Amino acid sequence: MSRKARLLKIQRLVVKVGTSLLTRQEGRLDQERMARFARELSDIRKCGVQVVLVSSGAIAAGMGELAWKKRPTDLAKKQAAAAVGQPRLMDDYRYFFRQEKQLIAQILLTKEDFDNRDRLRNIQATFETLLESNVIPVVNENDSVAVDEIRVGDNDSLAALVAAHIQADLLVLLTDVDGLMTRPPRQGEGELIHRVTDVTPAIEALAHSAPGSDGGTGGMLTKIRAAKYASRHNVAMVIASGQKPGVLPALVKGQTVGTLFLRAR
């Protein structure tokens, strides 16, 4: 099946937006970009595709509210920043989605929610009810209470967990690069890899060499790990740039954007 045919079959979409896309250098939320994501996701939902948004940015938003110039390293300060920033993040999303007449919901998760069978069933039922009601769930890790033992750790992995357990057709990880390149930026200009059928050691080596983004916890390596998990659970995945307007609508229309990781079966 062609790439376009695969993507045109999308009925349930999970989109993850990273911290680097949501914040400006001074640590404040990039409202212009948030408004664009709200508009594009709302338009996709109105076309009949169910949408889930996994959004980073709570800690960065909290830093802006608290006027902290440097991202904290100790757990208590990270959790404090997340506790302050998560309401601000949701307030902004609610405002921008409301402009599109689109209802959203907040879901905060930890790894423990996926490990406990009863809690997982409840989560799945909540997602199903929201999606059937044409609501866009906005998901983040519950950073204000999570400790290492119950943390997923990064939102690339969280998005893959969500996509797998709600049986999404496609997971899109939006970042600040066009996709997986044949060589990392520090080694000179490379070419975009448009399609990956299997995450081989060579693909993983490319991810190990690619630097992460400032302000977040992810990087290309976490995205490749997410691709492996998604593939094993029959979810296709795309890594693409969220800096360019129109990327999400283009993907849903089957256009060649970013790096597509195929399902395992």
Image (spheres, helix red, strand yellow):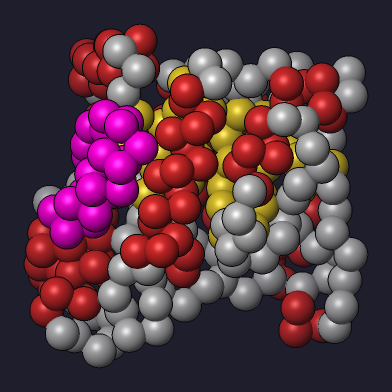
Is 179 on the left or on the right of 85, as rendered? Answer: right
The magenta segment is 87-108
Q: Could you say where residue 251 lies in the image, as x and y percent from the top left?
A: 69, 37
Quadrant for the C terminus, please. Answer: top right
Residue 100 highlighted magenta (yes or no): yes
Tally the numbered discs: 0
Camera sees residue 113: yes
User: Residue drawn 11% across and 59% down?
Assistant: 83
Residue furthest to the bottom = 69
Which quarter of the figure has residue 1? top right
Q: Is residue 164 left or right of residue 255?
A: left
Position in image of residue 117 (x %, y %) = 28, 16
Q: In the picture shown, does residue 9 fall above or below 220?
A: above
User: Residue at the location (25% across, 89% down)?
Assistant: 69
Residue beneath the point at 73% across and 21% down: 8
Q: Is residue 86 above or below residue 128?
A: below
Between residues 30 and 262, which one lies in front from this camera angle? 30
Q: Is any part of residue 150 visible from this angle? A: no
Identify which residue is drawn at 21% across, 20% down: 119
